[in-house]
Amino acid sequence: MPYDRFIPFTKYDVINLCAQLLPEPESFKQFSHLLSSLIHHQYYTHLESLKYHYAPFDPNSDTRKIKQLTTEQKAAHQSEFAKGFAQILNAANYEKITQDDLQDALNEESLFKVRLAVEFDDFAEVVFYRRGESQKTEVLTSWWGMRKKPLQFTNYDRVAVFIRFKDADYFAAKNKQPLGYEPNSTIVKLFQNVPKADLEMLFPNSEVKMRPIDKAVIASSALVGGAVVLVTKLGASIVLLAALFSFWLGWRSEEVHMGQQHFITFAIGMGVFGGFIFKEWSKFKNRKIRFMKALSDNLYFKNLDNNAGVFHTLVDSAQEEDVKEALLAYTFLLNSPKGLSPTQLDEKIETWFAQQHNCLLDFEINDALQKLTKMQLVNKQNEIFTAIPLHQAKASLDKQWDDLFKFS
């Protein structure tokens, strides 16, 4: 399994870990605060752009619209939002789930023990992103707990969903409405701890279907119970009715007589049989309701955020990743006075995480060096990078901060 780009430590933990590697920990923490503030301000522009382009089709908006946008204008907003959303997810070190991975997930055995049906034709665009991939083992029980089966599965720590519904003409042609959403609307959601095999439960139009085993259990129960009711309650009446119909059709010469008592017995038997059918139908509906409740309970604890709240969360995550990457790269360059190539620096950081913190990751060395170069915190000569001294780095960030406010 490929290593994640995500650094599974908080920004504050990374700052403290890096400070322990340097002779001036307090000065480094001040430098870290300045760098974090500048990166936070840079992401403010990204956040405002996402809010602006998402506003025309935000399903949770509580503000009025000054004017109605044309179809072309809405499409332009959706396109820009999709681009910006993908950029933020990449910055937050999320990986796109490919169509092949998604299809494999739909075909895998579900841990949820529920069969779900998804109407993919309702969507104009579907994109899933994930972060934090690991292998886990769950023990599945069956036959009332007597049979236990260990199942190994792929688990995603975070899953972001981007879905755009088709337009109103499509739903009008099919004479239906997307449940809880407007045609041509765009929804974004964020979930946690999602097994790869259960990705289909994250679709907004997924419907619970009975599994073959559930249908077999209910059907066998209904057949056996129905046969018992027919034999015990309606057996004599059915034989008598069959003889009566045979006489009417000329298949029987002996006349058949049915008294009032026979009709009463037959009516009672039919009532019992009808009650049995209703009971079995109710059992089927109740089983489906239990599955739906299990699905909603599961989603309740896995759902982290919805719509506009998702990209607020992702922007915060993206800027934290940027800060962590920049601080780690600067720290290790500062401890290497002769400088390091990108490959050497990458190996040093990844080895340090593996040996000191038992953490295997794919450090984003190019992103880290681009940030440090843009902020004028490193020098480059013949593909070798060196960090400027800490006091100069603080002075440089102070000047950039002052220039930023002068410009504002």
Image (cartoon, grey):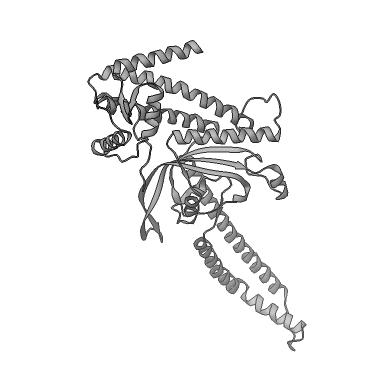
| Depicted 352 relative to depicted 266: above or below | above
Q: Which of 200 and 125 lies nearest the eye of the viewer? A: 125
* Residue 190 rendering spot, x and y as whole percentages: 49, 38
Picture quarter containing residue 230? Answer: bottom right
* Residue 371 rendering spot, x and y as whole percentages: 40, 27
* Residue 130 rendering spot, x and y as whole percentages: 45, 42
Q: How many marks?
A: 0
Q: Residue furthest top?
A: 406
Q: Is residue 296 left or right of residue 34?
A: right
Q: Residue furthest left?
A: 23
Q: Which of 110 and 400 lies nearest the eye of the viewer? A: 400
Q: Which of 76 and 289 lies nearest the eye of the viewer? A: 76
Q: Is residue 169 left or right of residue 194?
A: right
| Depicted 284 relative to depicted 73: above or below | below
- Give the residue at x 61% y 60%: 278
Q: Residue furthest bottom?
A: 253
- Give the residue at x 53% y 62%: 215
| Depicted 166 relative to depicted 394: above or below | below
Can the viewer see residue 57? Answer: no
Q: Which of 150 and 68 lies nearest the eye of the viewer? A: 68
Can the viewer see residue 36? Answer: yes
* Residue 185 rendering spot, x and y as whole percentages: 63, 38
